[in-house]
Image (cartoon, rainbow, N blue to C red):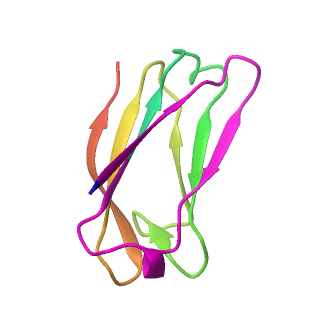
Amino acid sequence: TLASYRINTTSGVGTVTLPAISSANAGDEIEFIDAAGNASANPITITRTAPDAVRGGTSYVINTDYGVVRLRSDGLRTWHVTSEVVT
């Protein structure tokens, strides 16, 4: 399953919290898109729900304009980056 979210940070930085992996199936994907092209000035921070991890850490930042990241649940404890688009 893929869920896609277009984030607009025109008026300021954005923070998004991922759902707990316990509520996702292994292989579920979430995609975040800098819809307004402002991430270099107003970054989008994607944080995890504890004790889960994002790429082995606690967060992932989109800081390039029109950047896109797709994350996949391993069904255990980590959201893995499966693709990144930076312009």
**Left or right of 59, for residue 14:** right
**Left or right of 31, for residue 34:** right
**Magenta-colored stretch includes residue 6:** yes
Residue name at image x 57 percent, y 21 percent: 40
Residue name at image x 46 percent, y 76 percent: 23
Q: Position of residue 56 (x, y in %)?
A: 42, 69
Q: Position of residue 16 (x, y in %)?
A: 61, 49
Residue name at image x 71 percent, y 32 percent: 13
Comparing 29 with 71, the one in front is 29
Q: Quadrant of the C terminus?
A: top left
Q: Position of residue 71 (x, y in %)?
A: 34, 54
**Left or right of 11, for residue 29:** left
The quarter holding residue 14 reads: top right
Give the magenta part as a residue range. 2-30
Q: Quadrant of the N terminus?
A: bottom left
Query: Farthest right residue?
Result: 11
Q: Please say if 55 is above or below 35.
A: below
Q: Please say if 31 is above or below 21.
A: above
Comparing 54 with 73, the one in front is 73
Residue name at image x 60 percent, y 24 percent: 8
Q: Position of residue 21 (x, y in %)?
A: 44, 75
